[in-house]
Amino acid sequence: MAGLSWEPVIGLEIHVQLKTRTKMFCACEVAYFDTPNSHTCPVCLAHPGALPVANAKAIEYTVKLGLALGCEIAPRALFHRKNYFYPDLPKGYQISQYDVPLCGKGAFTVPEPEGDRVVGITRAHLEEDAAKNVHVGGTGGRIGGAAHTNVDFNRGGTPLVEIVTEPDLRSSDEAKRFLQLLRRTIVELGISDAEMEKGTLRVDANVSVRERGETGYRTRAELKNMNSFNFIARGIDAEIERQIGVWEGGGEVVQQTFDFDAATGKLTPRRAKEEADDYRYFPEPDLVPVEPSAELVERARAELPELPGTRVRRLEPELGFDLAEGLVASGRDRLFARTPGDRRAVANVLMNELAGAGVDPDAVDGDELGKLIEARNRVPRPVFADAIARSGDEGFSADPFLAEEATSDVAELGPLIDEILAANAGQVAAYRSGKEGLLGFFVGQVMKRTDGKADPRVVNELLRAKLSA
Ligand code: ADP
Ligand code: MG
Ligand code: ZN
């Protein structure tokens, strides 16, 4: 197939909303979801003469992130004005960083089943977010469909980090894996909640394709508005397929920006002129350069936690890649470390039952959970499920649940099984003539009659004995 000769090339641009108490250049509280326009001041509303002052916490957070991404930290970074006109930008420019970002070149290592993927980081810079346009009335959606647009300035001037990667990713899977690990890193650094659904983590994907073996890159398209990791992967796959079609059809891919529509999974092109890239950057005259002291940088470096990628590799030998990655990416590996018991059993319960019940792993007492997992074959299934669902409750104890041992009493189960076999003579005959798969049916009947409280191992044993008699 011709498709086999194409290699995708992907680079990401990621915006992270920092979790500081106040905005980037003023003392307004960061409160995106409060009453619209209830957190504003002359600075973030761009009144004439108001002067910005850089938020030291935002600088410290960005330095931490830069170090986790292996970036060089600039000893003297600059703020620039990025000029453009839009209703969500009252100054007519955004304060951002341009040729000297706070975090320069870096590399972020993503464990893959077949080895490491080292993703080059081009830069990570600090800027202010724009206000939020809320399109209302009409058919809604982007401007054009809406009757009018409201602007909420609570978000205006809040601190934002933009991370730009090199075009080093080679599939939608790799992009998703990179993003999950990056998200985990950001959350663990405590600098942002990084939640895509809430817009505190936003990702644009740049996609091109080339023939395998080709050295240069071809023209790319940019995808915006994808608000989950799965949508990003789907958007990238759709774009890869579209571009291969264009090239194979004798056409040429042109540089273009697409919006991803979550409802249809389709990419719609933006109007071509919407992104004129003439921002007329110039140094922000009202701000001094950012000069993080060597002391601050070294303290931040010393405080860096063990990174998620390293932890995946540490857990991999005992659990295998998928379980190790799943535990780390979901933030459950700390609970895994403090839960005693058979390692694979613990990992599986964390990834399946605990995740399914939506329990916050950080709220769980590992010792109590360990007791529960150890007894999982002795307590009735419904009791086990109930206990798991409550394992994150304040003061949770496994003991009351463990007291509810599964019924393994033969004197009680024997007559019940006789009754069930008598009532299902047809199935019994079928089983005896070779349809041994019917065993599950009988087990199910016993479980139903005992509200799931029968010990499945005893039930199986009794059934086999009685059916072969
Ligand atoms: P701009 O400044 O116009 O946004 P950049 O060169 O800074 O462009 O690249 C932005 C993003 O696009 C980066 O993440 C980069 O890795 C990615 N990128 C650049 N060229 C390509 C390409 N040919 N294919 C895929 N991604 C690309
Ligand atoms: Mg860009
Ligand atoms: Zn303000």
Image: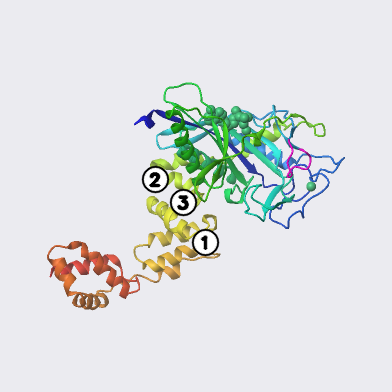
Work out whether residue 98 or residue 419 is closer to the camera in this orientation and state it: 98
Residue at image position (76%, 53%) is: 37
Q: State which tag comes first along the sequence, 1 or 3.
A: 3
Which kind of residue does numbered mark 1 sit on?
Gly
Question: What span is colored magenta in the figure?
Answer: 84-92
The residue closer to the viewer here, 29 or 246, is: 246
Q: Which mark is residue 392?
A: 1
- Mark 1 vs 2, N-terminal side: 2
Extreme right residue here?
49
State yes or no: discs 1 and 3 in contact (Cβ < 8 Å): no
Q: Is residue 384 magenta?
A: no
Tell me where residue 386 sits by quadrant: bottom left
Would you name the residue on which mark 3 appears? 336
Prevailing SS of the magenta stretch: loop
Q: Find residue 17 and report its horizontal and vertical position in percent.
A: 65, 45
Which residue is at the front of the view, 363 or 339?
363
Quadrant where ligand 1 appears: top right
Local packing at callout 2 (Cα closer than 10 Å; few below 14, some 14-19, many 20+) is some
For label 2, the residue is 319
Q: CA distance from mark 1 to mark 2?
A: 24 Å
Q: Is residue 423 above or below residue 340?
A: below
Q: Is residue 165 visible?
A: no
Using the numbered discs, state the Cα–Cα distance from disc 3 to disc 2 in whole angstroms: 11 Å
Question: Label 3 sits on what residue type?
Answer: Phe
